Image: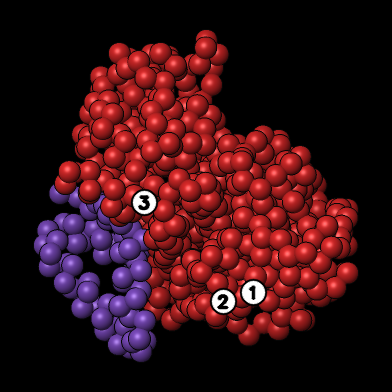
Chain colours: A purple, B red
Amino acid sequence: MSLTLTPNISDPDGFYAELIGSQRELSEDDALRMNARLVLLLANHIGDRTVLSEAIRLARAPGG
Amino acid sequence: MSNYVYPRFPYVCSAEQRSGETRRHPVVVIGAGPIGLTAALDLAARGQPVVVLDDNDTVSIGSRAVCYAKRPLEIWDRLGCAAPMVDKGVSWNIGKVFFRDQLSYQFDLLPEPDHRWPAMINLQQYHLEEILVDACSRSPLVDLRWKHRLVSLKQTDDHAQLAVETPDGIFTMEAQWVIACDGANSDTRRMVGAEFKGQFFQDRFLIADVKMKADFPTERWFWFDPPFHPGQSVLLHRQSDNIWRIDFQLGWDANPDEEKKPERVIPRIRAMLGESADFELEWVSIYQFACRRIDQFRHGRVLFAGDAAHQVSPFGARGANTGVQDIDNLAWKLSLVLHGEAPDSLIDSYHEERAFAADDNILNSTRATDFITPKTQVSRHFRDAVLDLAQHHAFARPLVNSGRLSTPTPYVTSSLNTPDGAPDSGAMTPGTNAADAPVTRAGQPGWLLNGLGGGFTVLTFDDAVAAKELSVDGIAARVLVVGRDIADARGLLAERYGAAEGTTYVFRPDQYVTARFPQFDEAAIAAAVRRACGKTGTVQQELAA
């Protein structure tokens, strides 16, 4: 399995609004903590180690 | 600083003001902007005399609204005005989004081919208004009165009383119905005590119209954080006559009075276009955005449309485009009620349907504004991450939001819709505006929407149907038979309407699907027309009988 890089989220605007809205009232630190938890939750959902490694690599260098 | 010569329309003292005799008019429209003028034309097209009052005597100062979408062009085509707009305007399909000094991604608005009107044209508001004023002046039913300012409004159950100020003093007129199209700062809205609530955005934008000969392509270009305007966004649009619209985001701390001085504006434009750029400033304004709407589109005998009823940020071209669709929704209903062919309560469906559309527009516009102006540091990181990733990976591109461009909101939950009788027939469900398609009429190439016209129309794919017109409580519904009245030479009509043998659609006078059935069933069609006219009670009685 490889990392999905084509659009895969239905209702992208709704998703983005929910994500940003969920942090609207948070301090910067609290938002960063929430993001860390969110990454871990999603990583566990994906599970596949190859996919996770590929995502980590691309997040460090988006063009790489 | 403008090259455009503003027309001056003559003030004429009305007969009723001269005589001092109070007259009651069926409809008075407040405000001769794009929405008020469209209201006058649409009512006149339905045989309804209408008076339009405007406190000024010229068109919009500065270009203001710029982008007009396909659906308003279809509406203006029904009113005979779209062709000169498209001729004078600039059509475009490509939008590019830049992040810092890189192209992040580009989109193509070009819908499927074989539609009559383009996805979007850009045209200065003053040109558009001149075309509409010209059309009004050719209509014997439109009484357009310049230098007429509404100063007070009182209502009873069956009319409104208007005090109107002109250069000859104040006089009183009465109206069975008033359509308030007097913009975001509507005085009429204050006069009826309506609430106008929503969200203000703590940001300011500099809007400049610039005349230049430039070799930019005719595309919408949007920059996030460009080198020439760091930390903010910039939008570039082409209009007609070599006029270009540039929006600079300035942030909340900008001083509006200082920022609109040419000595502040010109260096910003030079930084963008280069030191050698040759341009002239046409018009400059500082904007602050709000997304809000009126509590009720109907206050007794006063109906609100356009910015008087709802205000959005400009990202997505949802202001004037939505207002024109308000009128498309209202004019046929008002006309039926004035002719005694539908109950007064049909007017309430105007609020039901258009408040639903306004909320959809406000939602989209708020989301775009939130993307363009992140409210927190972490949300800015998310925004920048989306833009970074979009450069390299397709998945992030749908998340980039520099404005979702205006498309009609389907009235999916409207009480005027008949439950879908042909759910297997594709996307044209009740509440959706009619998709256009090329057809042949009397051997000549034409378009479906021109064939639908401005009344109730039944479109059927059953070529054995003989009826030319149905009469439902005196309301005519024209019958358009595919294979008899129009030919679907290329099969696109059947494709867009998911049609099988017998599929039958009922369109409202604003060209929205109100019902569809697997067969041509006169009783079902009549019930759908009654329901679309707000006569649900009658239908229930008949079913019970």
Inspect the image, locate mark 1, and give the three-letter code of the amino acid beneath it: Leu
Is residue B103 in view from this perspective?
A: no
Inspect the image, locate mark 2, and give the three-letter code of the amino acid beneath it: Val
Extreme residue toward the top, this view: B443
Q: Mark 3 points at which residue?
A: B534
Q: Subunit of mark 1?
A: B
Which image quarter holds the C terminus of chain B? Answer: top left
Label annotation for residue B113: none
Q: In this view, does B55 lie above or below B250?
A: above
Binning the other alpha carbons within 10 Å of mark 3 as few (below 14), some (14 to 19) or many (20 upward) gives: many
For residue B74, side relative to residue B467 (left or right)? right
Helix, strand or loop under label 1 = strand
Label annotation for residue B192: 2
Helix, strand or loop under label 3 = loop
Q: What whole-number distance in Å separates the C-alpha atoms at marks 2 and 3? A: 26 Å
Q: Is residue B465 above or below residue B301?
A: above
Binning the other alpha carbons within 10 Å of mark 1 as few (below 14), some (14 to 19) or many (20 upward) gives: many
Label annotation for residue B153: 1
Query: Which corner quadrant of the image does residue B28 belong to?
Result: bottom right
Binning the other alpha carbons within 10 Å of mark 2 as few (below 14), some (14 to 19) or many (20 upward) gives: some
Residue B23 in percent (x, y) is at 71, 61
Helix, strand or loop under label 2 = loop
Inspect the image, locate mark 3, and give the three-letter code of the amino acid beneath it: Gly
Point out the tag, 1 or 2, that comes first from the N-terminus. Answer: 1
Q: Subunit of mark 2?
A: B
Residue B80 in percent (x, y) is at 65, 36
